[in-house]
Image (cartoon, rainbow, N blue to C red):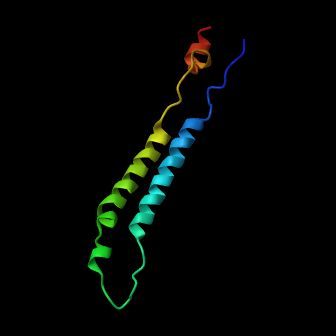
Amino acid sequence: MEKKNAHAFGFRKENYKFLIIGLAVNIIGYLLMIGGAAKDPNTFDESELFSEVRITVAPILIVAGFVIILYSIMKKPASSKGAEVEPASSSADNTSK
């Protein structure tokens, strides 16, 4: 009787895809938050500093990226019918045989 490995690695190809997508969304959010440099350092441009992209869009993208990353970590792989693994038996089960 062949025993299957009960301690398989939890991350699959699909998990890595979601992880990379989440990291990309985070990087885009941080880049949008950085914004551009001021044309003249002696003048203060309030509309550039407090733009909707820096105040609203970038933080939403950053939070969405972290949610996608969390989903990629917590997502369980889809189990196929032939690849089911039996739970490990306890020591009490072994002594009764």
Rendering coords of residue 13 (x, y %): 60, 37
Question: Which quarter of the picture shows residue 60?
Answer: bottom left
Picture quarter with the C terminus = top right
58 horizontally vs 3: left or right? left
Q: Is residue 9 above or below residue 91?
A: below
Residue at point 57%, 14% (across, down) = 93
Rendering coords of residue 48 (x, y %): 32, 75
Q: Is residue 42 above or below residue 49?
A: below
Can the viewer see residue 11 in this picture? no
73 horizontally vs 89: left or right? left
The outermost residue toward the right is 1
Residue at point 55%, 16% (across, down) = 92
Residue at point 52%, 46% (across, down) = 19
The outermost residue toward the front is 39
Rendering coords of residue 10 (x, y %): 57, 35
Question: Which quarter of the picture shows residue 90?
Answer: top right
Q: How many marks?
A: 0
Q: Is residue 31 above or below residue 96?
A: below
Who is closer to the viewer here, 59 or 46? 46
9 horizontally vs 74: left or right? right
Picture quarter with the N terminus = top right
The outermost residue toward the bottom is 42
Residue at point 39%, 56% (across, down) = 62
Can the viewer see residue 81 in this picture? yes
